[in-house]
Image (cartoon, helix red, strand yellow):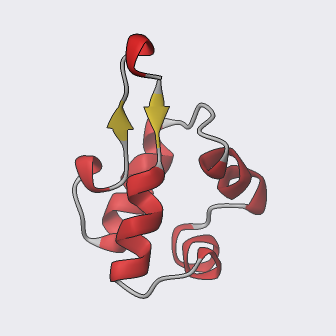
Amino acid sequence: MIKFDRLWETMHKKNVSTYYLREKCGIDSKTVRRLKANENIETKTLDKICQALNCKLEDIAEFIPEEDK
């Protein structure tokens, strides 16, 4: 499972809101909802987020093996 808890931590550290993601990255509210629910996200969306936050993929997502859920 891919979790996006690190995204919210990174956004908090950088004082960035979901409004910023929608306006700066062109990410719609439906995609923000999917991120909050740890649902599938396209890699181009992850790229946009990393570009906007000036961070690495591991700063916004983490892989959790099934047995660790």
Residue 2 in the image: state x and y as whole percent: 45, 31
- Residue 4, above or below 38: below
Determine the image quadrant of residue 10. Answer: bottom left
Residue 22 in the image: state x and y as whole percent: 63, 72
Q: How many marks?
A: 0
Determine the image quadrant of residue 66. Answer: top left
Left or right of 50, for residue 46: right
Given residues 24 and 66, the one toward you in this image is 66
Kindly identify the residue that appears in the image at 39 percent across and 20 percent down. 68
Kindly identify the residue that appears in the image at 37 percent across and 26 percent down. 64
Residue 33 in the image: state x and y as whole percent: 73, 53
Kindly identify the residue that appears in the image at 32 percent across and 65 percent down. 51
Left or right of 29, for residue 61: left
Kindly identify the residue that appears in the image at 56 percent across and 37 percent down. 41
Determine the image quadrant of residue 39. Answer: top right
Q: Residue furthest bottom?
A: 15
- Residue 14, above or below 38: below
Q: Residue furthest right?
A: 30
